Amino acid sequence: MEQYYYNHMNKQEQAAYHGILQGLSGLADEFQIPALDRETLYNVFFQLRLDHPEIFWATGYKYRYYKESPNIIFVPEYLFDKGKIKEHQKAMKSRVEKLVRPAKEMSEWEKEKYVHDFICQNVHYDKLKKAYSHEIIGPLGQGVGVCEGIAKAVKVLLDALGVWCVIAICGNNPEKGIKYRHTWNIVRIGGTYYHLDATFDNTLGNSDKVEDIRYDYFNLDDKSIFRDHEPLIAAAPHCTDHDRFYYREKKLSFTKTEDVYKRSLQAAKKGKTLTFHWRGGYLTREVLNELLGLIRKAGEEKNKTAAVNINWPQAVLRLHYTEAQMQESITMEDANEGEKE
């Protein structure tokens, strides 16, 4: 496991990071670290917990400083009393070991999918935003989480499976109604970096059925992810490749309109859901209308009506057919609903 954020700090920040890590790991009540200004100290503490999501019990801190002193006294705030922390530590260790056991012999890409699918099938977005939902104990222990807790859970599981993974973080944007920072993961598969946002896929595929798991944010490049994610506020690897994007891997990324028509016809005939990515140029309103026309035509041939969900920023359409007498349904989806309030 690489301490990615630690490796991007200066010597003084690293010394403070190391001191905080030791203190938190030992459940110390207070300890001395090199003095940093308020903002830098906050960033070191926050980024340490991104590097070490297994430290779920420290959610805040206070500190005391003395004039002319090169050090400060760091006073951590713990989520539980120390006895409870030790109980939870044991439970989390056992939980992670049990969860990763079936995936040990898989390929990197399969391990990534296994962890992504676990999140999408077992974790509900916590709109109440309880304190533990920001830590691994929410998703892995309670089955609930917000983006930060989900990204930390993904990292803990992929770390245990030996897949390189870091947590990426972007800012909020009140002008767009985005109230909170958002976190997701960057993974390295076959030596190449990709964005993985299990939270966004989770909020899209909010059905309990396995076939309803969404992969719109599974191995995106920078260009794709930043269509609906704000700019990063901390260092992260650049992701320039999109060849391992889920829908490309599964041959569900179409460049020709006839492929959309042909696969829609199959979905109407077999009564199955079809989710595909459009890669034949920009998904403009005109192109979307053309695709919807083909989906409608395929349904009419089988005497059925289409229900279509559209993730416009990522050019992903999900459709299934209902009986002909039902009204056609076209829904624009927003994967970011949990971060907007």
Image (tube, helix red, strand yellow):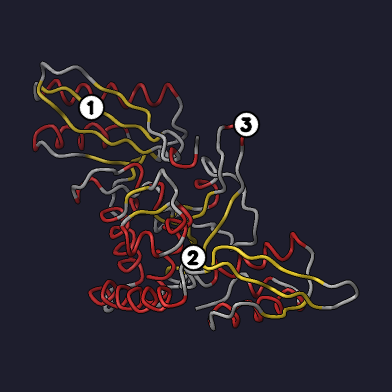
First of labels 1, 3 by sequence position: 3
Residue position for label 1: 307
For badge 3, the amino acid type reads: Glu
First of labels 3, 2 by sequence position: 2
For badge 2, the amino acid type reads: Leu
Mark in the foreground, 1 or 2: 2
Residue 171: x and y in percent read: 61, 47
Q: Give the Cα distance between marks 3 and 2.
A: 33 Å
Q: Residues within 10 Å of mark 2 (few under 14, many from 20)?
A: some
Q: Give the Cα distance between marks 1 and 3.
A: 32 Å
Indicate which disc residue 175 carries: 3
For badge 1, the amino acid type reads: Ala
Residue 32: x and y in percent read: 72, 80
Residue 327: x and y in percent read: 19, 17
223 and 337: which is toward the camera: 337
Does 104 sit left or right of 273 as displayed? right
Q: Which secondary structure lies at badge 3?
A: helix
Indicate which disc residue 79 carries: 2
337 and 136: which is toward the camera: 136
What residue lies at 50% left-to-right and 53% top-to-bottom?
221
